[in-house]
Image: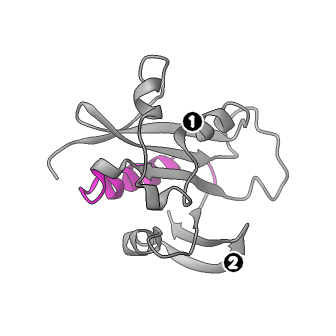
């Protein structure tokens, strides 16, 4: 992969491009659409979300549940962990290394947040799901299931 990957703020100018990004039809049950994710982000003060850009093209979307965000007043349990809440690479750009590089940037960003020792995520355990991708990156299964999804973590 020769393209430089970056995490870019979503603005009125690039929103339309981000909303056009889609996973493959067989993957649609694994992650919410970007439209749903962005709408949820605007109503949850713990949301931190960015477009994934490779050179001049948008290739994906990522969102963290970051309880250290200003204004978030959740429970003590909600403040304990930072989560990779949403993560997607458009079907046209999968298997080009963009997801791995974007996760590296997300982990680097997460390390700048106060007091978190690990990043949590979850996935649907089904054929064609992202399990292999996450485990190959270095996430480990925690042994927990939440909302029917396998919970994984990676030390920061």
- Along the line of sight, the residue nearer the viewer: 19 or 72: 19
**What kind of element bears circle 2?**
strand
> Which colouring convention does the figure follow?
one colour
Answer with mark 1 or mark 2, whichever residue precedes in sequence. 1
Q: Quadrant of residue 147?
A: bottom right
Which quadrant of the view contains residue 45? top right
Q: Kindly identify which residue carries mark 1.
A: 35
Left or right of 28, for residue 67: right
Q: Position of residue 101 (x, y in %)?
A: 32, 53
Is 144 on the left or on the right of 4, as rendered? right
| SS category of the residue bearing label 1 | helix
What number of labels is visible?
A: 2
**Residue lying farthest to the front in this orientation:** 25
User: Within 10 Å of the Cα at label 1, are there few (<14), some (14-19), or many (20+) other Cα atoms?
Assistant: some
Instruction: Assess whether residue 83 is covered by the magenta stretch.
Output: no
Q: Nearer the viewer, residue 2 or 127?
A: 127
Say if 150 sits above or below 98 in the image. below
Residue at the spot of label 2: 144
Residue 30 image position (x, y, % from top left): 54, 60
Q: CA distance from mark 1 to mark 2?
A: 28 Å
Mark 1 or 2: the one toward you: 1
What main secondary structure does the magenta stretch of the protein show? Answer: helix
Q: Which residues are magenta?
A: 93-115
For the point 67% across and 30% down, the residue is 42
Give x and y (percent) for residue 91. 35, 51
Vertical order, 105 against 37 (above or below): below
């Amino acid at each position: 992969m020769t393209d430089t990957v970056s995490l870019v703020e979503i603005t009125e100018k690039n929103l339309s491009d981000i909303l056009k990004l889609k996973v493959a039809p067989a993957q649609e049950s694994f992650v919410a659409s970007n439209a749903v994710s962005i709408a949820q982000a605007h109503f949850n003060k713990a949301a931190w979300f960015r477009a994934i850009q490779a050179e001049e093209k948008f290739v994906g979307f990522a969102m963290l549940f970051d309880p250290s965000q200003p204004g978030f007043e959740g429970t003590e349990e909600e403040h304990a962990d930072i989560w990779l809440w949403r993560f997607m690479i458009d079907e046209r750009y999968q298997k080009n290394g963009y997801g791995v590089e974007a996760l590296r940037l997300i982990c680097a960003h997460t390390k700048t947040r106060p007091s978190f020792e690990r990043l949590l995520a979850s996935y649907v355990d089904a054929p064609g799901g992202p399990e292999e991708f996450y485990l190959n990156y270095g996430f480990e299964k925690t042994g927990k299931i939440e909302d029917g999804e396998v919970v994984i973590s990676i030390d920061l």
